[in-house]
Amino acid sequence: MNAAIPRQKFGPRLNSQIFPTTRPSPKVDCLKFAPLIILVVCVLTAISGCASRKPVAASQPPTDTSSAPETASESAKASTPASPARSVAGAKRRRDAAAIPVPAGYEEKGEASWYGVPFHGRQASNGEIYDMNKLTAAHRTLPFETMVRVTNERNGKSTVVRITDRGPFVNNRVIDLSYAAAREIDSIGPGVVPVRLEVLSTGIDPETGFFTIQVGSFRERTNAERLRERLSATYSPTFVKRYDTSSGVFYRVHVGKVSGEEAAKEFGERLRSSEGVAPMVIRLDDTFSEAGENQ
């Protein structure tokens, strides 16, 4: 067993040399390594900067496949249901409608109204069931299936609709839009707005075909029959047509079967002068029959 050697007292100087209390630390020349330290810091900074950035793929604008007139027409022919809320898709449809080249053809200006309940789910004039959430409309003289661009002249918004019904039977109104179409051009709130109509369908002459003149509208059928009997002595055919509206049932008196819209307008003005009526030109569709209408 080794015994610890006691510290001897040889004086402060000699004692510190024989029994040193601490080891002297080596001196480091920091300036000598400064360039290396700076280089390391720069490399680490660059690496961390690259790691924090995520690569972004170069985006290209989507190809617009709806700019051609036939594409927009097919969209309206399909009567795509409008979204419950105004959406990006709805805004795109309006932009697509505005981008369609306007053909040199039929144009009309006037006021547009819209209709929804209680007509939703009822049979339209062309035989199909009216769906207020599809892009359709009623017009007095344009043939069924005609594609029409409707532009709200207050805000410039447009939509494309398919004619499936007859109306509106109010002077100065040129078209009755479905609820979905009215929402596209922001006319739900106002109810009636000034519009411009442009026929987009090709191969359609809106002024050809047979037309009749509406000369009166009555809530009581007896009043309608009285006018029909008076006019039938001079004009043929003369018939009464029942029409359901949101305000109730009306009985409308129609006179004549005229070839061509211009000739029908002239005939209507003659009736205005001679009979004191307010004429309204309406197209006679393929389903028309004098016996069937006079009910």
Image: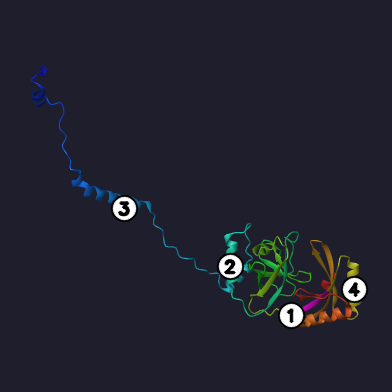
Please report contact status of discs 3 and 1: CB closer than 8 Å, yes or no.
Answer: no
Q: Which residues are magenta?
A: 208-214
| One can see residue 239 in this view | yes
Q: From the image, state whether disc 3 or disc 1 is nearer to you.
A: 3
Q: In 3D space, how far apart are the residues under numbered discs 2 and 4 (Cα atoms)? A: 48 Å
Task: Mark 1 or mark 2: name the one nearer the start of the chain.
Answer: 2
Picture mark count:
4
Amino acid type at image mark 4: Leu
Amino acid type at image mark 2: Arg
Task: Mark 3 or mark 1: name the one nearer the start of the chain.
Answer: 3
Residue under the point 58% across and 71% down: 99
Residue 45 spot, x, y in % from top left: 31, 50
Task: Mark 3 or mark 2: name the one nearer the start of the chain.
Answer: 3
Residue pointed to by mark 4: 227
Residue 46's tag is 3
Residue 209's tag is 1
Residue under the point 75% across and 80% down: 261
Please name whichever residue, 201 or 40, is drawn nearer the observer in this view of the structure: 40
Residue pointed to by mark 2: 95
Q: Main secondary structure of the magenta part?
A: strand
Please report contact status of discs 3 and 4: CB closer than 8 Å, yes or no.
Answer: no
Which quadrant holds the N terminus?
top left
Task: Mark 3 or mark 4: name the one nearer the start of the chain.
Answer: 3
